[in-house]
Amino acid sequence: MIHDLCHCASHNQGSGVSSSSEDDALSLHPEGTLLQWQQETLHRFRVILTEEGLIRKRDDDNSLLRFLRARGFNIAKAKAMFEAMLDWRKEIGADTIKQTFQFPERDAIKELYPHFHHKTDKMGRPLYIERLGQLQVDELLKITTMDRMLLYHVQEWEIVIDWKLPACSKKAGINISQSLTILDMKGVTMRHMSKQVRNFIQKITKIDQDFYPEYLGKMFIVNAPTAFKAMWTVVRPWLDKATQKKIEVHSGNFTSKLLELVDSENLPAFLGGTCCCPGGCENADAGPWNESSYQNNQPSDEPPKAPY
């Protein structure tokens, strides 16, 4: 929840309304190709950004489409969003944060707040899993700060975009640009939604919705406790209707649903699959990104691992 419940925040945040025209703007042909008017809008958007010197080497069509979709294919709004993203990246140093931000407390943090990528689903998308019932906020704050956690959050985004998604794409043979998220709520109580946690979620919601839009493919919230309704009341207003449609909440009997999208051998045993990585799935970082055949062989382009 600290990390990826907010990864889903996307377009028209705050309105809580998705009009029919906005739904049309997000639609695709059954084959997955853009509608003709969407393709033309994408072309105009690229031309405008290029003429103003805003396009970067990394800005392929899929990257630009995120901003268009996040703003209902309104070019002016998408351009403003894109420019704000560039300013923010310069301010925070996002282009070099993989190399420059040192986070030696990472391993200890992951013990107190288990969150990890683990293999892929049947579509080739990386699985992102959080075990929220094991979150120990008080202990976490003894070894780091929320500001450092924010920088870590950005660093993780850059690793996913530059390293993990390209590897998944190479293995799948198609462009993979979204993830499947599973939030395991087993053991969660209202203490996990302290004021500090709520404030942190609000901050990363802004980062994710404004600067990393449209990366969520699907989210399952499983083992939802009785207290979840109160938690959802807090979080739901931050998410637009299109995002809410991507989220399924299950209190029990969720394994069959997960196995519709994830092969059993890729799903950790604690979620009903058969995968039992040596040392625990949460520590394995198993996936195409760690398989040499799917990594970029160009030294200048291969994103290095973060300096933990």
Image (cartoon, rainbow, N blue to C red):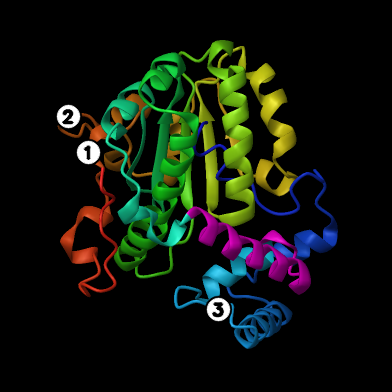
Q: Which class describes the residues within 10 Å of circle 3: few (<14), some (14-19), or many (20+)?
A: some
Q: Residue under circle 2?
A: 279
Task: For residue 211, say whether it is visible.
Answer: yes
Check residue 55 in the rendering and tell me which mark sits there, or answer none: 3
Placement of 141 over or under 93, stated as above or below: above
Mark pair 2, 1: CA separation:
7 Å
- Amino acid marked by disc 3: Ile
From the image, tell me which residue sits under label 1: 284
- Count up the numbered dots: 3
Q: Are marks 3 and 2 in contact (CB under 8 Å)?
A: no
**Residue at left 75%, top 64%?**
72
**Mark found first going from the N terminus, 1 or 3:** 3
**Whole-percent x, y for residue 135 in the image:** 43, 20
Q: Spatial distance from mark 1 to mark 3, Cα to Cα?
A: 36 Å
| Magenta region | 70-92
- In-image side of 219 versus 152 (left or right): right
| Mark 1 burial class by Cα count in 10 Å: few <14, some 14-19, many 20+ | some
Q: Mark 2 or mark 1: which comes first in sequence?
A: 2
Q: Does 94 lie within the magenta span?
A: no
Residue 92, horizontal then vertical, whole percent: 50, 53
